[in-house]
Amino acid sequence: MKQWSTVLIADLHLKSRDSYGVDTGNGGLDTRTLRRLWLLDQAVDYAVDNQVDCFTILGDLFNSRTISEAVREQVARRFLRLEGAGIKDILFVPGNHELYQGHVPLLSDSVLFPRLQVIVEPCKPWSDLPIFCVPDLGKAKVEEAINSAVDLCRDDSIKAPILFGHFAVAGAYMTDTEVNTRGVDPELLKKFPVVLLGDFHRKQLFDGSVPQGYTNDRDFLRGYVGSLARNSFSEEHQQKGFAHLAVEQSPEDDGNFRYIAKVIPVEDDPFVTIDVTDGGMDKFAGNLPDVASAIVRIRFYGTDDWFSGLPVADMVDLCYGEGAQFVKTEPTITVSGVAPVVGEETLEFDVYKTVTAAAKNKQQNLTMGLRYIGDALTKVGN
């Protein structure tokens, strides 16, 4: 029986400087970037230990088209380790964060990335495998590429094609609650028994379901692999990981292909949200959850008088004292007498305004937010 296998990762979003990271003095690498590289190591180690044929990146390995040499060199080290371990191919299907005018500037150095195949146009990389790759070229071009692949399968009698790509599919979840309505028509994907994609960070099958707890008791053949790392607080409760796909071809079965896919969980830094609606330091300390190694967001909901009397700096220091890796604060200042709505991300301008207060400009943002409220109330009054 002939077999081919690959590890697939997606949406790691490496950055020159991560906004949730703390500088370590280690070659310009912050704590969050080091964690992302550690997560990449988990996938690389798995690929080496299982001697897969290919290491596949389904887009957005990098968060932008320009990135520091320090981060590029760290990625190159992982690629060279794959090559040294005998992994035959490294396949890169670019995402929207990397693809620029038909190429990927960050991966153009053949010295750093000697065994890398960068797929900038839809193609079938191997003649003996029914695999098609489609990068993020926009909805119209992606749909055209999928239709062309289907036609080729019909003309060449390819019975069970595989599709790797990075693009949006209509009906898929962009977050835990938001559903995409403008992506590629999912009906076009029905000709492919295996469709594994990057783009949306929530791991999901195309019907929106998620295999419970990343167990391997059911095949994961059609859906989004999900991001290898958490990228925002909207992913706070999502399990992260990567996929392993094996393709088997049996002469006894007329040469037909059989596919086995499973998902491998990884442990990313926890993201923890703390909502504060009343009380002071004593209540905050008494209700503090486990924040060890966490990226912490403290959200305050209340009036300006209440918020200005809070020992915010002491609350932040307490989180750091309990082992938090990074702490940000978000005050939502409400008009006196109007009850805050906890958890609302988009708020009506004529009632209250959410103000994100980063550590460097917390007071400036708060002042601007209060001025916005005053202007809005003036308009309402007139």
Image: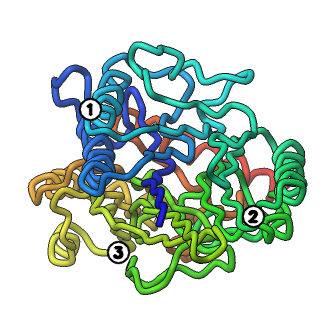
- The 10 Å Cα crowd at callout 1, few under 14, some 14 to 19, many 20 or more, is few
Q: In this view, does 16 lie above or below 348?
A: above
Q: Measuring from the top left, give residue 85's x and y in whole percent.
A: 26, 39
CA distance for labels 1 and 3: 57 Å
> Looking at numbered disc 2 in the image, what kind of residue is underneath it?
Asn
Badge 2 element: loop
In the visual, does 4 lie left or right of 275?
right
Q: Distance between the residues labelled 2 and 1?
A: 41 Å
Q: Residue at image x 64%, y 34%?
A: 119
Query: Disc 3 designates what residue?
Result: 278
How far from the left and from the top, in percent, is residue 138?
81, 42
Looking at the image, residue 313 lies above or below residue 257: above
- Badge count: 3
- Look at the numbered disc 3 and give the secondary structure of its residue: loop
Q: Position of residue 337 (x, y in %)?
A: 56, 74
Which image quarter: residue 287? Answer: bottom left
In the image, which is nearer the foreground, mark 2 or mark 1? 1
What residue occupies the far left of the structure in this picture? 321
* Marks 2 and 3, the one that precedes in the sequence: 2
Density class for disc 3 (Cα within 10 Å; few <14, some 14-19, many ≥20) is few
Query: Could you tell me how far apart the alpha carbons at marks 2 and 3 are, in whole angstroms?
Result: 36 Å
Kindly indicate the quadrant of the structure image that contains residue 187.
bottom right
Q: Is residue 35 visible?
A: yes
Residue on which the image places disc 2: 180
Residue at left offset 86%, top offset 42%? 141
Which amino acid type corresponds to the residue marked 1 in the rendered image? Gly
Relative to residue 20, is residue 228 depicted above or below?
below
Q: In which quarter of the image is residue 382?
A: bottom right
Whether residue 171 sits left or right of residue 91 in the image: it is: right
Q: Which of 351 and 251 is in front in this view?
A: 251
- The residue that label 1 is drawn on is 84
Identify the residue shown where x is 74% and y is 33%.
Answer: 121
